[in-house]
Image: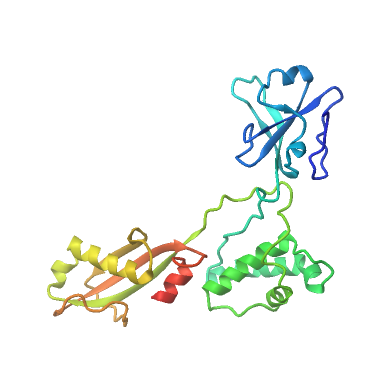
Amino acid sequence: GGGGSSGDGRKADCKPGEVTAYILGSYGAKAGQCSETCTTTQGLGWMPQHKNGSCADAGFKEMMEAKSFKPQGSPQPLQVRIMGNASSSCHCHSFEQINCDASGDALYNEHVEELRKYCGDIISGSSNVCPYKCFQPFEVMHLNYIECSTRPKHTLFKQVEATNKCHKAARAPFGTKCQETKQAATTVIGGFTMSVTNASGFINDAQANYGVKMAVAKLAAVNQTAVTVKFSLVARRLESVLLPRLLSATGTVDVSYTINAPAIGGAGSAIDVRNRL
């Protein structure tokens, strides 16, 4: 029926004489979401795909965002509310990356201060739900500790970790725009030396480059498209057992490689690649 409610404590705010109309997966809503707007009974007649009622009536009770949407051919935009449900709403998992070296100290300290500011209730036990503003810096620091061995776990981080409540957070605050689920990539860099018969010819041999590239990809357990290999005659005294000698030889070639991999995850992630190499 009429004005309705969003189901998230936010009224539809339709004016007297207006009704709420909704549509699924259109008018600014993605698949699995609902868009609702205020219109008149007469206006609803010009919106044949809309239904009279609210998104809550269709089972979408979580407010995602309010925005302006201009339908094709319409002279003016509509104010719509995008609604979702528990399965379609997001928690905005962060892929912000803190560098392992001193260049990451400022960002690291910023996250420590956020723990200090927003995690008091979860640490004290006065709250059983980890606030999003506590979860976000906790998650970023958690990933940093996994990826880097340059910083010991901060006392505040360990206190939050001990609650076992912040690997899953409360929903992101209303109005927060979540990222699409695309993992940030990071680069794994390494190198080793090879002895070859003809070093000068070897460094310009495309087939040799491809063969080494495939060998590195196999050892790292990644797709060869993620690997870049470069040859050089400059000796850098790199000790490595990464690869067996491909050719018995007299010349020395330095091999440098870069591997692009997701910052987090299981097999094929940067952490997994480093462990393999």
The residue positioned 80% from the left and 26% from the top of the image is 19
On screen, residue 224 versus residue 93, left or right, reads left
Location of residue 146 (image quadrant): bottom right
Location of residue 69 (image quadrant): top right
Work out whether 20 lies above or below 243. above
**Residue 222: percent from left, percent from top:** 38, 64
Return the residue nearer the eye: 64 or 54: 54
Work out whether 236 lies above or below 217. below
On screen, residue 120 versus residue 143, left or right, reads right
Location of the C terminus by quadrant is: bottom left
Location of the N terminus by quadrant is: top right
The residue positioned 71% from the left and 75% from the top of the image is 156
**Residue 83: percent from left, percent from top:** 71, 41
Residue projecting furthest to the right: 16
**Residue 89: percent from left, percent from top:** 67, 49
**Residue 7: percent from left, percent from top:** 80, 43
Residue projecting furthest to the front: 58
Work out whether 127 lies above or below 83. below
Q: How many marks?
A: 0
Q: Note whether residue 110 is visible.
A: no
Q: How is the image coloured?
A: rainbow
Return the residue nearer the eye: 256 or 18: 18
The residue positioned 33% from the left and 68% from the top of the image is 218
Q: Note whether residue 122 is visible.
A: yes
